[in-house]
Amino acid sequence: MNPFVKLFSYLEAKFGRPRLSIWRTLYANLRLLPFKQALHFPVRIYGRVMLTNLNGRIEITAHAKNVRLDIGRNIAGYVNTAPGRLYIADGATLRVGNEVKFSQGSNVCICKGACLEVGEYSTLGDNAKIICYRHIKIGKHSGLTWETQTTDFNSHFIEDCNTNQIYPIVKEVAIGDYCWIGNRTTVMPGTKLPDRVIVTSNSLLNKDYTSSIPSYSLIGGIPAKLLRTNVRRIYELDRERDLLNSLCQVQEP
C-alpha cells in the first residue's frame, strides 16, 4: 500500500471516531460509582455524550479488576449519529457486567426507581435507544444493533370505553444470552426471548417467546414469528474474520 495512503488511513481512523472525553469520564465515575471504585475509572465516556440527571447509580457485577463500560464509542461505525445521551434518574440503577459497550449516538434512559441490567460483553449499537421504566434485562454476549429501540412501557394509558378499564402500560422485558437483534427492530413491553435467538432487521417483538420459540432460532417480521431453527450467529472472531476476508477478496480476471 502507498505510504501516503497508509498515513491518511491511520489519521482518518484516529480522528474520525469519538475520542475519550476525560472530563465526562471523570464526572460520570465520581457521580455514579462508590468513590473507591470510581478511582479505577471503569466507565469510559467517548465523544460528546450528554450526561443528564445522573441521580441514580451504576452497579458493576463483574469481579475482574479491569472492568470496562464504554459509552459513546465507535463500535461498528455504520451510522452517522448525533451525540448520545445517558439518563439515570433518582433511585435508578444501571447494572452491568464486564466489557459492556454502548455505541455512539445511543440513548439510554432509566426512569426513577427502574433497573436496567446488561450482561457481560453485550452491546448497544449506533443510535439505538433504551427507555427503562421498571425493569429491562439483557443477557450476556447479546447485541441490540443500530437504530433498535427497546422499552418496557407504553407512553400513554388506554381506557376501555365500555368498562372504563385502564390497560396496564408497564411490562418487564427480558432478552436471553447470545441473542442478536437486527437493526431497526422494536422491542416492546412484555418481550421475552430465550437464549441464542437471532432477530431479523425491521422486526417487532411484542410478547413472551420463551414457550413457543426454541433456542438457536431465527425469528422476524411484524410481529415476529419463527422463520428457522438450528441456526446460530458465529461469535468466533478468527472464523468470522476469515469469512469476511474471503468475501472481500477480488477475483483475478
Image: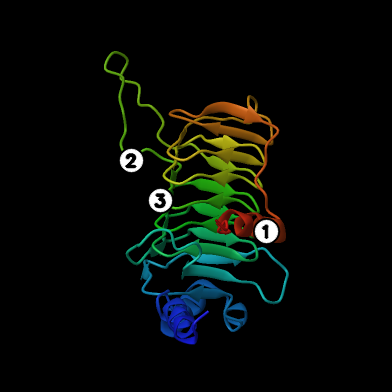
Residue in the picture at 45% in, 35% down: 203
Mark 2 or mark 3: which is in front? 3
* Amino acid on which disc 1 is placed: Asp
Name the element at disc 3. Answer: loop
Mark 1 or mark 3: which is in front? 1
Q: Position of residue 36 (x, y in %)?
A: 62, 82
Q: Classify mark 2: residues with Cα within 10 Å, few (<14), some (14-19) or many (20+).
A: few
The mark found on residue 81 in the picture is none
| Mark 2–mark 1 distance (CA, rounded to whole Å) | 45 Å
Give the residue at mark 3.
Answer: 147
* Amino acid on which disc 3 is placed: Glu
Q: Classify mark 1: residues with Cα within 10 Å, few (<14), some (14-19) or many (20+).
A: few
Name the element at disc 2. Answer: loop
Give the residue at mark 1.
Answer: 242
Residues 238 and 107: in front is 238
Residue 120 seen in this snapshot: no
